[in-house]
Image (tube, helix red, strand yellow):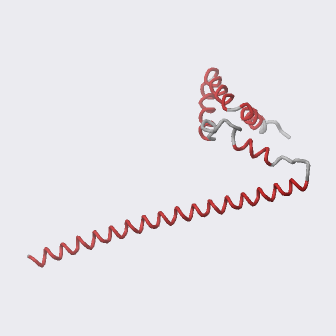
Amino acid sequence: MSTVGTWPTQAETWLDEKGKGAWIAAMILGFIFFWPVGLALLAYMIWSKRMFAKSNGGCGRRSRRYSFRSSGNTAFDAYKADTLSRLEEEQQNFEAFLTRLREAKDKAEFDDFMDEREKKARDAKKSEQDDTIEA
């Protein structure tokens, strides 16, 4: 296996294990030695949400990595895999529900806008007709 593609992942894992302070220290050192490296680390920390992650337990990737580690007991591992897949399915269903809810809200707002626009157009047309009748 080539180490070219793995050293950034290893560095990321090492920094995650050390916590947010290690990321900040690496960024500062990057700015000191070669500013584009510090800027790249800052952008990566913001983009990956490491800058704003809670410091109790590190990033989500780290906790997910440990949740899929084998316990050595096949019955428990099967139960854990089943539970995790069920939870992932529930999360997908909930996200789909939220999407449908947002779409329904957007449609209702758009329908209200169109109804209001149509009402204004009818009122304007009616007032034009009233003005021509009076003249």
Where is 74 relative to 1, above or below?
below
Give the x, y percent position of residue 107. 46, 67
Residue occupying the point 80% across, 59% down: 82
Residue pushed farthest top?
A: 32
In this rendering, would 27 be left or right of 113? right
Where is 59 relative to 110, above or below?
above
Give the x, y percent position of residue 35. 60, 25
Numbered label tally: 0
Residue occupying the point 64% across, 21% down: 33
Query: For the C terminus, which image quadrant?
Result: bottom left
In this rendering, would 107 be left or right of 82? left
Residue pushed farthest right?
A: 73
Residue 53, quarter of the rendered image: top right
- Give whichever of 33, 63 is nearer the camera: 63
Give the x, y percent position of residue 131. 13, 74
Query: For the N terminus, which image quadrant?
Result: top right
Residue pushed farthest left?
A: 135
Residue occupying the point 39% across, 67% down: 112
Residue occupying the point 67% across, 58% down: 91
Where is 42 relative to 120, above or below?
above
In this rendering, would 53 be left or right of 80? left
- Give whichever of 110, 79 is nearer the camera: 79
Give the x, y percent position of residue 36. 60, 28
Residue 55, quarter of the rendered image: top right
- Give whichever of 38, 103 is nearer the camera: 103
